[in-house]
Every structure is written in C-alpha cells, then in structure tokens.
Amino acid sequence: MTRAKLSLYDTTLRDGQQTQGVQFSTAEKQAIAAMLDTLGVDYIEGGWPGANPTDSAFFETAQTQHATLTAFGMTKRVGRSAENDDVLAAVLNAGTPAVCLVGKTHPFHVDTALGCTLDENLEAIRASIAHVTAQGREALFDAEHFFDGYSADPDYAIACATTALDAGARWIVLCDTNGGTMPGRIAEVTRAVIEAGVPGSHLGIHTHNDTEQAVAGSLAAVEAGARQIQGTLNGLGERCGNANLTALIPTLVLKSPYREMFDTGISTDGLADLTRISRKLDDILNRVPRREAAYVGASAFAHKAGLHASAIAKNPATYEHIPPETVGNARIIPMSNQAGLSNLRKRLEGAGLPTDDTDALRLILDRIKTREDAGYSYDTAQASFELLAREALGQLPDFFEVKRYRVTVERRKNKYDQVVSLSEAVVVVKVGGEKKLSVSESMDAEGTDRGPVNALAKALTKDLGAYQDLIEDIRLVDFKVRITQGGTEAVTRVIIDSEDDKGRRWSTVGVSANIVDASFEALVDAIRWKLVQDT
Ligand SMILES: CC(=O)SCCNC(=O)CCNC(=O)[C@H](O)C(C)(C)COP(=O)(O)OP(=O)(O)OC[C@H]1O[C@@H](n2cnc3c(N)ncnc32)[C@H](O)[C@@H]1OP(=O)(O)O
Ligand SMILES: CC(=O)C(=O)O
C-alpha cells in the first residue's frame, strides 16, 4: 500500500517563542533550526520578520538543506492594499520560499479585533494570499479560531478557507487557536471542510494544548483527512503550548494506523536523534527536561516497581511499548522503596558490583526501604544509592572521615550602609591518618555571597590530601530542597547534582532536620562517588 505524504510543519521558533519565559537569541534560533533540518521536518517557521530584531536577523542568515524555510505574518490591514502594507512587506522581504499568513475566520474576531466587515476580511485574505503567490512564494493560510468560528458561522469560516485556497494558498491550516476543541469535534469539522471543497491534501491542523489534547486533536484531524500537522518541539507554545512534535513524530512513525498510512519523511536516524534534540532544546532554554515526557523523558523507560523490573529482566517488551533506543532514549531501573531484587541486581550490574550474595542484597533493599521511610529518595539520587550498596557489600574504600564542620552566617551593614551577608565554613577531615582543617568563605571572585552551602563545599574540597587532584573538576550544578516527612517528623531533603570534566553528571541525597546538614551529607556523597569512579 502506498503511504500518503504527511507534511510536518515546525513552529518552535514562532509559536514556541510565544511561550511565557522563552526568548530565543538569533544564534539559538539558528541552532534549533539546524536540529530541525537534520531531524527531517518539512517546514521550519522561523518567526515573524519585521516584528522584532531577533526574528529579522534570523532570516538574514537562515539556511536549510531539507526543510522549507517559512516566514510568518498576518493578512494585510483593511484600508490599504497588500502591496502597500508595511507589515506584509517586511514579512515578504525576508525572502523565504514559503510565507504563512494568519487571518481571521470567526465573525466575532473580525468584528471585535479587526473592527471591519466580514467581506472586508475576506478581501484581505484574498489579496494577501494572492500577493504572496504573485511573488512566486508558497503561501500558507493559518485560519485562526477556525473551529470556534465554524461553530458560530460555518458558512463564513468555510468561505475564509476557500477564499485562501482560490487565491493560491498551498495549505489551509485549521487552527484551534484557543485550544478548547475536543478531538472528536476537530475530526468532524475537518471532514466538513473537505466536503465543502478544500482537499485534504491542502489541509493542515494547528492545535493548542489547553485541554491537554493537542496531540490527540492533531491525530483526529489527520484521520479525518488533513495532511499537514503544525507543532513544536517539547510542545512549546502560547499559554499551555502547541501540539508536541516530540510526541507526535514517534507516534506517526511507529504506531498503527499512522505508520501504515503516512510517510512523514522522518528517517530511522532522525527518530533516534529525537531524545538528544529534545534535551538540547531544554539546555538552550536553561530548563530542566521534563522526566515524564512521552518517548524522550528520562522516566519514559524507567522501571521503578519491583514487579516491572523483574519482568523487564526477562524480556523488556513486558513493560515497554517500544524499544527506548528507537527514539534515542535509554532504559533505567532505579532503586527505591518500590524495588525488589530484580531492580537491585540490574543496578548493581550496571555499577560493576557483585550480585550473587542474596543475603547482602536483601540487606541493601532493607536499608533503602528504611532510609526512604526516613525521608531519603534514591530513585533520582542514584549515586547515593550506589554508595549505600558498596558500603553494604564491603566495597566502599574509606577515603576520608569528616571529624566536624561548622558554618556561620553573618548579616550586617557595610561601610556604604548596604546590607550584606557572608558565610564562613570550617571543615575538619581525616585523610590518610592526617587531620586537615580547611576554612572558606561564601564570597565568589565577583564579591557575590553564594551562601553557606557554597562555603561548606569550598571548605570540604579545599584539601583532601592525596585525593585533591581527583576532585578539582567537580562542579555543583543543581540543588533541590524539599521539606518532606521522615517517619513522623518533617525533615529537609536535599538533592545535589554534580558534574565533572569527563562529562559525568550524578545526583546525591542528604536528609536532616537542618538544611545545611542535609546539604553537607549530599556534598560528602558527591565527593565519595567521584573518588569511587576515579581511584
Ligand atoms: C494566533 C497567533 O498566535 S498569531 C501570532 C501572534 N504573534 C504575535 O503577535 C507576535 C508578534 N507581534 C508583534 O510583534 C506585534 O503585534 C506586531 C508588530 C505584529 C503588530 O504590532 P502593532 O502594530 O503595535 O499592533 P498590536 O500588536 O497592538 O495589535 C495588533 C494589530 O493587528 C491587527 N490584526 C490582528 N490580526 C490581524 C490579521 N489577521 N490581519 C490584519 N490585521 C490583524 C489588530 O486588529 C491590531 O490592529 P490595531 O492596532 O489597528 O488595533
Ligand atoms: C496561528 C496560530 O498560532 C493560532 O491560531 O494558534
């Protein structure tokens, strides 16, 4: 059976940039466009030229090998010709092979937002699309508020779509702009538009995630006959986001009936790059990747429960809907109070530790469950888990012993009458039979106070004797604090993420009634884990 072409249109750089808190630089836009191009999407909407300097600068240098670069804009304003509309001119001046114009299709919006008549809006759509195609560009029409507009006045919404089609638009994209339409209704309206004369091969779908159904709505539209999906990486986008291409792409490529029906042009290699691309985008945005994200999240193939881990060891298909490597992800078997011997064996094997002493393994499981009851959490702090296991198995070298530590925090006025704070830490350790006392302050080279935990970390890593060279490259990259329940008392749990020059990243946990003490415990574990790896 020949598969129909399903066009993928990425709007991460336009609608994705409408996410609250997201502000791409031109260089970041270029990096994201390059990733999308390699991934194999058909269109990359780079932004709105003329709307801001970043978007204009992006189009000055943007290049793609595979994807059609697309500039976004709006239909001309009423009262001026398309040729004399300065906003439209700036969009066209970007010189892209494709141009996507958003236009109104809902009488309420024509009246309220534009303040013109329904006929004037139809003429604006016609003239704008005709102007784009007259310049030899491919035109797309984003039919804004189409589903709500169709419900209010089906004839007018259809007239907007057919006007754009007749004026030469290659794609009429039905937009669920407010994100409130149910997938069943999206399918029903899409079918009605096709019946009214817009062929499915010219119809696209653009959904928003306000009811957490943007992906479902997109799939409903293609099942009804639409042949283009617009979406964004990691589901970025205005308000609750757009249809998430990072979830849609694997579904379209791997799942029935889509894989038999459609050719998306995404290769096996492109699919296997998806997890890296998703995390790279988060890295650019300085966001922590969503662990539970479908297909690409760190937990998407994490098997925490003992029953699951036991079956996974026999055959991964027991609890995995696809092999994780298909999308470039990896299986993990975390340790926690939900774990059994199977989880434990898998984790110990991964750390190169013996798994044959069942009594020792039971002891480790008991310790984990008891400590988790006291407030610890090992399913993310896998480095602390490994240290606990090594200790129980008698495989943890006695690198150093902390004899005592002290931290003071001072808040005072300086000579300029400004309030300043400063922490000072003293740590005494015993290394190789020798006692060492180190003192550090929390002030960094720029004179900024980095707080008591920073002062402690500096003091602890100042002089560890023979181990000093091995710990110089440790960096503390994330620090999470949580008030939780330890038995019957409230305690503080601190999780610290560290990394080193070898590109390793590891997490450790500490628990105490006192936040500084919990942090100190996690810091000590971070150093011990690093020494285990490098000695
Ligand atoms: C559904 C979507 O996500 S569409 C994409 C929306 N994206 C953005 O708005 C981001 C980029 N936008 C911008 O930088 C600015 O809004 C600009 C440069 C485009 C316009 O700025 P301004 O000229 O200051 O106008 P402003 O943003 O205040 O208002 C939008 C104007 O466009 C008009 N307009 C809105 N949609 C359309 C349309 N489809 N066709 C013609 N005019 C439109 C509005 O009626 C309003 O006109 P008014 O100023 O006469 O009331
Ligand atoms: C065009 C667009 O982004 C929307 O209607 O949601």
Image (cartoon, grey):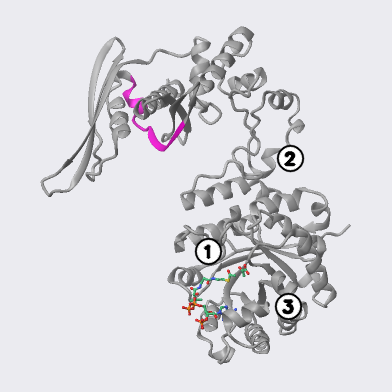
Residue at image coords 54%, 78%: 91
- Residue 203, located in which quarter of the rendered image? bottom right
Check the image and report above or below for 471 versus 51: above
- Residue tagged 1: 18
Q: What element carries label 1?
A: helix
Few, some or many residues within 10 Å of mark 1 (<14, 14–19, 20+): some
Provide the residue designation for mark 3.
157
Q: What element carries label 3?
A: helix
Q: Distance between the residues labelled 2 and 3?
A: 41 Å
Cβ–Cβ under 8 Å for marks 1 and 2: no
Residue 189 placement, left or right of 85? right
What residue lies at 15% left-to-right and 43% top-to-bottom? 413
- The quarter of the picture where the C terminus appears is top left
**Disc 2 element:** loop
Residue 117 forms part of the magenta stretch: no
The kind of residue tagged 3 is Ala
For the residue with label 3, is its CB less than 8 Å from the closest atom of ligand 2? no
Sequence order check, earlier mark of 2 and 3: 3
**Ligand 2 within 8 Å of the CB at mark 2:** no
Amino acid at pointer 1: Gln
